[in-house]
Image: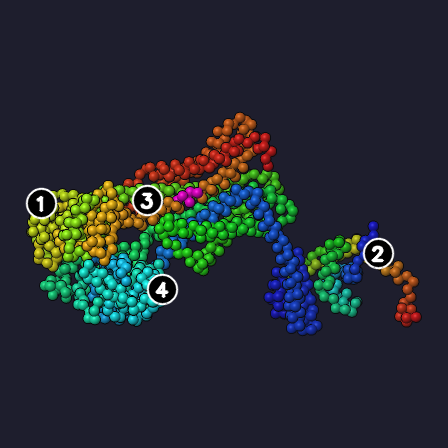
């Protein structure tokens, strides 16, 4: 069964979490997406896709011990589930397929 | 990291409060970390503002999410509440109506009590206004007066700087007034000083307080009186004629019209008129030992009355002492002989409830009754609340299944508590609304039934409204808290298992509440019986004179010139048996004079109630002679003789044969030999024991006529008497009352207590029964299965009814055991109010206990019978 296609923000979040591994909590995720896209993403715009991905079981989360720099508060670290990893693979496959036969050179020059 | 470098405190709190629950507290940390990041990059100020802005953005979102679900759930709670009310219509009715009835009773009593305690508090200077009252002790007697010497008021104003002003009011006059040929009968007329309206500020419809009583022969009318005389025309300047006697008609000019005095004031008058008829003031009586006017004074704001009271003995020894020494007597000796005059400054606000002399301006209230009824109100409210709680908790147990289902479906405990409380609030609110409607609808009936006045405007006053809101919240919390807290705490598995299991703690609690209700019911019922008995006793006791078929004709003083002919004409009527002119008659107020045995020293004196009357007095009233003889018309020496009652002989210590022993008025050397002794009769109300009484012959026309009429045709007799009256005094109204009615009126306060108590004890009983009815229904429901099993094993219908009754009979008996001594004690206290009283019999308690028992058995049996007759198979299937 093929999974439903994910939205762009969801895709970004999944990728960022995969890359960040043990450090995958809200702030670094936001930072990475902001830096890569060159656009300021607010915390809220990160929370929303995360919440949705948790609900659809692409992500799980666990709570770490409190740290001082967060005012003694715990942080919630996210991790991809098997379903999450599979969906990244299928996104990649779909994207790859779609790009097949598109020449970057022609896209850049227009001719 | 600096500790001061924290996100804005308020915003942080707000954020943590806005976040849904524990699990979601991690964003708080996220935000704080982000905050520090921004602080590093763009500075603290920017970071702080960013933080605040984030939180602010969150508010509308969270609010929408929260309220949306709360409203949805609230709607659901109310829908479920209304459904469950509908499903158990009878129960809902009992519960809401019982509470409404209790609240309505409590409100009615509150309105009555508020009216009683609000007397004379609305005057501008209420707190500084006082009336002087005097307690007079002689060697043997003690009397209270609110009438004072006329010279007192001017003395107070001139001698004491703390007295801002003082003013006088005469004793009440009853006169006929003529205007344009019409005769009006006026009962509430008082002479007043010109500064009266400076003490008691009233609003003037015409004229002003300065001019109202400034001139002689002026008269001030109240609004309703002026309307009676002049309709809508202006009253000021009009002349009315005051009829002092058949030959003496005095013109008075209306100078002002004031608003009717407030209902809650002891000052009730229709007219005030000036002291003086003509320009020059008549010689003011300067005596200190004769009383005739009411004295009011206004003290400096906040001046304690005790301080001025402390100065009164010195004032008396100065002025009254001077008066006595002018008469050749000595004040110190006078005091040493046991005579004492205690002047009190009574705040006007206290007059209505605490002053009970014979000369009150308006019927006084009864502080004891006010206290009693406040207690009754509180008890009824308690009974109703207890009832309501009982029924609510009993009912909630049958809803265990619903609660269990809600829990299974994920209801949180907080939500369950909210649901139970909102349901309870809904019902309480319904009850209050019903109660207010009940009060407004029943108020007129209540007032006429009990003869009380209610302060209905008080329904809109802030304290009462706040009190009611508090009560709604309190009752809904109390009644809702048991099901809310206990039921929501039970694990859901237990709840769904059996919907009818009750816990024993709850049963014990409810039973003790039922005992409490019945204690109150029995108390009120037996109290009603005792009050009834006492009033019957008062009204039927042999008073020692003939009160049936005797009428009292008022204002007989106008026959000054033609008394003998008038009397003879009356006696000639076939319907009239006896006629006697007298200064006072039993049940009317008597003059009190100081007398002493003839040989006694001058300082000895006793307070004696005196009647001046003609020779027919004894016959007309049917008094009985103990020893000696009655006055005889052919003995002229009798005009200097006296007849006394037995109580006088005892009080004065006259021993041996009283006939021929002499009496004298103190300060006077004339001696009056006793010619006859009358058997004691109750010329005053039965609140007091029989006082010394003396009867002197007086042949001029005294103020009242006692006419004993032939009972065969009373209306005919009245008509004939009136015809004769009109012949002799055409310009005067013929006014009469029946002696037995005036006797009855002396117990008006007791009668009012009686009707109030009857009404409220019945209502309390109704409420308690409603409660019992509901409670027994639930007991039966809870034991349905048990009853089914019992029937299968051969229990009879009557056996099951008896079994269910036994439980409730026990509570009734416990209630009886508690209530009887309480009632006995309370009613003994009340009866001490009377010098003559009935015995508290066993029957009162047997009756009230019996009534309560009977009603409870009936109530329970109705339920039990239904359960006992149902088929056992239905019962066993019941869950």
Mark 1 and mark 3, same subunit?
Answer: yes
Discs 3 and 4 lie in a common subunit:
yes
Residue A90: which disc? 2
Query: Closer to the camera: disc 2 or disc 1?
Result: 1
Q: Which of marks 4 and 1 is nearer the N terminus?
A: 4
Say whether residue B863 is left or right of residue B658.
right
User: Which corner quadrant holds the C terminus of chain B?
Assistant: top right
Range shown magenta: B761-766
Q: Distance between the residues labelled 4 and 1?
A: 68 Å
Mark 3 near mark 4, Cβ–Cβ under 8 Å? no
Q: Mark 3 points at which residue?
A: B531
Q: Is mark 3 on a helix, strand or loop?
A: helix
Tell me the tag on residue B657.
1
Near-viewer residue (B710 or B292): B710
Label 2 to label 4: alpha-carbon separation: 101 Å
Give the left or right position of residue B663, taking residue B458 as reference. left
Q: Are marks 4 and 1 in contact (CB under 8 Å)?
A: no
Q: Which mark is residue B73?
A: none
- On the image, the x and y values in percent for residue A104 come to 90, 67
Q: Can residue B770 be seen in this view?
A: yes
Question: Would you place residue B78 above or below residue B170 in this image?
Answer: above
Residue B701 position in % (x across, y down):
16, 55
Check chain identity for marks 3 and 2: say if they share one. no
Count of numbered marks: 4
């Amino acid at each position: 069964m093929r999974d439903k296609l994910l939205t762009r923000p969801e895709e970004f979040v999944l990728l960022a979490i995969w890359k960040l591994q043990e450090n995958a909590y809200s702030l670094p995720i936001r930072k990475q997406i902001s830096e890569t896209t060159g656009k300021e993403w607010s915390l809220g715009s990160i929370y929303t896709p995360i919440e949705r991905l948790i609900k659809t079981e692409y992500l799980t989360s666990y709570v770490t011990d409190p740290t001082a720099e967060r005012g003694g508060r715990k942080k919630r670290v996210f991790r991809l589930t098997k379903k999450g990893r599979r969906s990244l693979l299928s996104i990649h496959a779909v994207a790859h397929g779609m790009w097949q036969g598109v020449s970057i050179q022609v896209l850049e020059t227009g001719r | 990291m600096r500790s001061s470098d924290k996100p804005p405190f308020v915003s942080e709190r707000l954020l943590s409060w806005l976040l849904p629950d524990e699990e979601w507290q991690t964003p708080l940390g996220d935000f704080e970390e982000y905050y520090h990041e921004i602080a590093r990059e763009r500075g603290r100020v920017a970071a702080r503002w960013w933080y605040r802005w984030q939180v602010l953005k969150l508010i509308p979102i969270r609010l929408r999410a929260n309220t949306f679900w709360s409203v949805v759930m609230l709607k659901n709670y109310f829908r479920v509440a209304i459904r469950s009310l509908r499903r158990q219509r009878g129960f809902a009715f009992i519960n809401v109506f019982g509470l409404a009835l209790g609240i309505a009773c409590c409100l009615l009593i509150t309105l009555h009590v508020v009216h009683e305690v609000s007397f004379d508090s609305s005057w501008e200077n209420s707190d500084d206004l006082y009336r002087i009252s005097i307690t007079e002790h002689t060697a043997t007697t003690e009397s209270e007066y609110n009438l004072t010497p006329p010279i007192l008021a001017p003395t107070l104003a001139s001698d004491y700087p703390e007295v801002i002003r003082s003013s006088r009011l005469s004793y009440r006059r009853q006169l006929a007034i003529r205007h344009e040929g019409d005769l009006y009968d006026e009962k509430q007329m008082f002479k007043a000083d010109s500064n009266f309206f400076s003490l008691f500020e009233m609003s003037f419809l015409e004229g002003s307080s300065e001019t109202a009583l400034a001139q002689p022969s002026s008269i001030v009318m109240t609004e309703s009186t002026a309307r009676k005389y002049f309709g809508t025309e202006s009253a000021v300047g009009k002349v009315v004629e005051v009829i002092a006697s058949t030959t003496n008609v005095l013109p008075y000019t209306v100078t002002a019209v004031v608003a009717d005095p407030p209902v809650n004031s002891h000052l009730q008058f229709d007219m005030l008129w000036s002291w003086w008829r003509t320009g020059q003031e008549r010689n003011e009586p300067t005596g200190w030992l004769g009383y005739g006017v009411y004295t009011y004074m206004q003290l400096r704001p906040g001046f304690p009355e005790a301080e001025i009271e402390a100065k009164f003995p010195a004032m008396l020894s100065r002025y009254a002492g001077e008066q006595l020494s002018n008469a050749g007597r000595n004040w110190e000796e006078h005091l040493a002989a046991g005579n004492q005059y205690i002047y009190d400054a009574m705040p006007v606000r206290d007059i209505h409830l605490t002053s009970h002399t014979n000369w009150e301006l308006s019927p006084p209230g009864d502080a004891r009754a006010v206290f009693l009824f406040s207690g009754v109100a509180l008890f009824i409210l308690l009974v109703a609340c207890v009832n309501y709680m009982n029924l609510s908790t009993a009912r909630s147990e049958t809803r265990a299944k619903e609660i269990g289902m809600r829990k299974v479906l994920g209801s949180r405990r907080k939500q369950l508590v909210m649901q139970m409380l909102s349901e309870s609030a809904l019902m309480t609110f319904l009850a209050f609304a019903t109660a207010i409607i009940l009060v407004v609808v029943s108020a007129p009936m209540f007032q006429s039934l009990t003869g009380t006045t209610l302060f209905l405007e008080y329904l809109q006053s802030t304290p009462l409204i706040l009190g009611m809101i508090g009560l709604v919240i309190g009752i809904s919390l109390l009644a809702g808290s048991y099901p809310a807290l206990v039921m929501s705490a039970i694990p859901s598995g237990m709840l769904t298992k059996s919907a009818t299991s009750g816990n024993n703690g709850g049963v014990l609690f409810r039973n003790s509440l039922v005992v409490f209700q019945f204690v109150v019911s029995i108390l009120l019922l037996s109290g009603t019986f005792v009050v009834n008995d006492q009033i019957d006793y008062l009204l039927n006791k042999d008073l020692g004179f003939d009160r049936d078929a005797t009428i009292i004709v008022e204002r007989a003083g106008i026959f000054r010139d033609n008394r003998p002919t008038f009397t003879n004409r009356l006696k000639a009527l076939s319907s009239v048996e006896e006629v006697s002119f007298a200064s006072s008659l039993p049940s009317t107020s008597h003059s009190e004079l100081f007398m002493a045995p003839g040989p006694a020293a001058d300082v000895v004196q006793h307070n004696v109630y005196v009647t001046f009357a003609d020779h027919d007095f004894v016959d007309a009233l049917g008094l009985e002679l103990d020893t000696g003889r009655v006055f005889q018309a052919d003995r002229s020496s009798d005009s200097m003789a006296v007849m006394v009652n037995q109580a006088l002989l005892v009080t004065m210590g006259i021993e041996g044969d009283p006939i021929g022993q002499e009496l004298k008025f103190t300060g006077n050397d004339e001696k009056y030999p006793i010619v006859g002794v009358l058997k004691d009769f109750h010329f005053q109300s039965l609140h007091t024991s029989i006082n010394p009484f003396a009867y002197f012959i007086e042949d001029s026309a005294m103020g009242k006529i006692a006419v004993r009429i032939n009972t065969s045709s009373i209306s005919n007799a009245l008509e004939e008497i009136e015809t004769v009256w009109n012949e002799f005094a055409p310009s005067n109204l013929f006014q009469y009352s029946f002696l037995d009615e005036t006797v009855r009126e002396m117990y008006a306060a007791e009668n009012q207590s009686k009707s109030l108590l009857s009404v409220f004890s019945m209502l309390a009983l109704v409420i308690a029964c409603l409660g019992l009815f509901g409670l027994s229904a639930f007991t039966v429901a809870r034991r349905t299965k048990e009853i089914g099993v019992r029937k299968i094993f051969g229990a009879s219908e009557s056996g099951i009814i008896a079994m269910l009754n036994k439980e409730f009979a026990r509570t009734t008996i416990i209630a009886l055991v508690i209530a009887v001594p309480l009632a006995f004690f309370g009613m003994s206290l009340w009866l001490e109010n009377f010098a003559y009283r009935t015995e508290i019999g066993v029957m009162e308690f047997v009756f009230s206990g019996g009534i309560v028992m009977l009603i409870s058995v009936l109530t329970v049996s109705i339920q039990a019978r239904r359960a006992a007759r149902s088929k056992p198979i239905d019962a066993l299937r019941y869950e």
